[in-house]
Amino acid sequence: MRVRTHQDIARIEVEPNDMKTILENHESIVNELQNYGYKYITLDLIGYLSGSMNKVLA
């Protein structure tokens, strides 16, 4: 699992098999991330992918 920061957006990356767990617990996850100052919380549908930010650097 990883949470990427994009200004006031938290982008959650998990393995596809874990997405159901994130959705089942979305209220507590949203509350916790909002406590850290995020205005928007998203679930990346591509999922956790090591090195995914390298695509932006290319």
Image (cartoon, grey):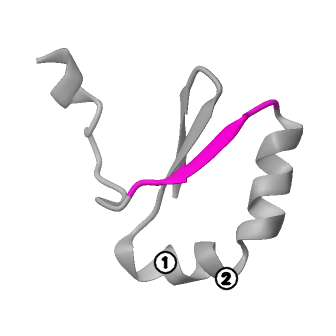
Identify the residue shown where x is 65% and y is 40%. 40
**Disc 1 element:** helix
Residue 41: say if magenta.
Answer: yes
**Mark 1 and 2 residues: CB-CB less than 8 Å, in contact?**
no
Identify the residue shown where x is 29% and y is 31%. 53
Identify the residue shown where x is 48% and y is 75%. 19
Magenta segment range? 37-44
Q: Residues within 10 Å of mark 1 (few under 14, many from 20)?
A: few
Question: Which residue is labeled 1 in the image?
Answer: 18
| Three-letter code, disc 2 | Glu
Q: Position of residue 39 (x, y in %)?
A: 72, 35
Left or right of residue 57, residue 26 in this image: right
Query: Residue 3: which numbered mark, if any?
Result: none
Quarter location, residue 8? top right
Residue at the extreme left of the image, as rendered? 58
Left or right of residue 58, residue 44 in this image: right
Residue 55 higher or lower than 43, as above or below: above
Quarter location, residue 14? bottom left
Front residue (pair 40, 11): 40
Q: Residues within 10 Å of mark 2 (few under 14, many from 20)?
A: few
Q: Position of residue 42 (x, y in %)?
A: 54, 50
Query: Residue 24: which numbered mark, if any?
Result: 2
**Disc 2 element:** helix
